[in-house]
Amino acid sequence: MSQVVHPPESSYNLLPREEFHAQKPPRYMSKHRPAVVLEQKSSKDAMRTMGPAKVEVPPPDEYLKKHSKEPKLPEKTQDSKEARKACTVRKPAVPARTDIPIMGLRSNRDFIKTAIAVSMKPKPTCVDSRKGHKQLLENSGLVPKYIKKRDYGEVPEYLQQRNEEEQRAQEAYVNSVKEQREQGAMKHLSDEERQAVLEGLKKNWDELHREYQGLSLVTDTLSKKSRKERLEAALKQLETDINRFERFKTIYIPTKQNH
């Protein structure tokens, strides 16, 4: 069972107390409230219906007929026919084939520009991507327009000129070698002599290479640096001479020097 709790006894509780009720201020009401309520109610109730909208139903004999909503031309009357017959202005007749055209007529119209503007056609293009990128067909390389040139398939002039210069230089070199051979200024090396010279060049290259390998790794002085450069130049020259003797089988050497 629940225990009843009594307030503690006090002398102040013996005197009766007056109950105090706080009064709230009156609620604010706008003076335009009735007009707003009436306007809102009228706008809501205007579209509120029960069942189908109440509209005027046409009578049964005025049903929708075929072509009834198409625009109609005004009916021809007797006045319109008389006004058409009363028109005396007529267009000139078509000139005959034997008529001579009138000379000296001038016009401000540019017939050339008009003809060009009328006859302009879109330029052919080609699309080369799935996103629609296009370019002129003439510049795309797909049109064989170069085969229609007059000089198509012929050697260009600059190549002909260069070939002629090379041929003249070769002929001049052959003639000079022939003249020197006839005068005894050049000597043809035999295979034994060429082999002996080649072996001597390789031997010299081995000696210089052995000397080059014995150089110091640190080139801290000018003498070391100059000696290294001199050996490198001599080895490079020997390698060039060896390559020439191995590459060419026919070799001519000058027997005397012209001062």
Image (spheres, grey):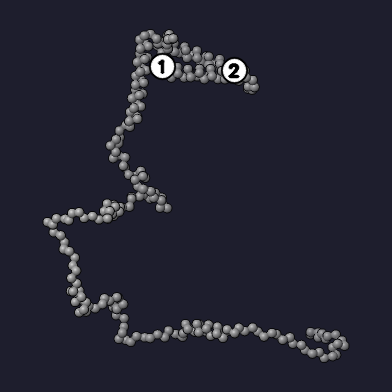
Residue shown at 16% from the left, 63% from the top: 93
Image quadrant where residue 31 sits = bottom right
In the image, is 50 to the left or to the right of 59?
right
Residue at the far left: name it: 98
The quarter of the rendered structure image containing the C terminus is: top left
Residue shown at 45% from the left, 13% from the top: 195
How far is the residue under mark 1 from the one under mark 2?
34 Å
Q: Which residue is mark 2?
A: 227
Frontmost of labels 1 and 2 is 2
Nearer to us in this view, 210 or 77: 77
Nearer to us in this view, 118 or 41: 118
**Helix, strand or loop status at disc 1:** loop
Rendering coords of residue 66 (x, y %): 28, 78
For label 2, count other residues whose C-alpha is less than 10 Å away and answer few (under 14), some (14-19) or many (20+): some
Q: Residue 190 has which mark?
A: none
Nearer to us in this view, 20 or 6: 20
Image quadrant where residue 154 sits = top left
Rendering coords of residue 243 (x, y %): 46, 19
**Helix, strand or loop status at disc 2:** helix
Residue at the far front: name it: 104
Q: Earlier in the sequence, mark 1 or mark 2?
A: 2
Rendering coords of residue 104 (x, y %): 20, 54
Image quadrant where residue 12 sits = bottom right
Three-letter code for the amino acid on which mark 1 is drawn: Lys
Three-letter code for the amino acid on which mark 2 is drawn: Arg
For label 1, count other residues whose C-alpha is less than 10 Å away and answer few (under 14), some (14-19) or many (20+): few
Residue 119 visible in this rendered orientation of the protein: no
Residue shown at 42% from the left, 12% from the top: 253
Residue 29 visible in this rendered orientation of the protein: yes
Nearer to us in this view, 172 or 26: 26
Q: Residue 249 has which mark?
A: 1
In the image, is 169 to the left or to the right of 228?
left
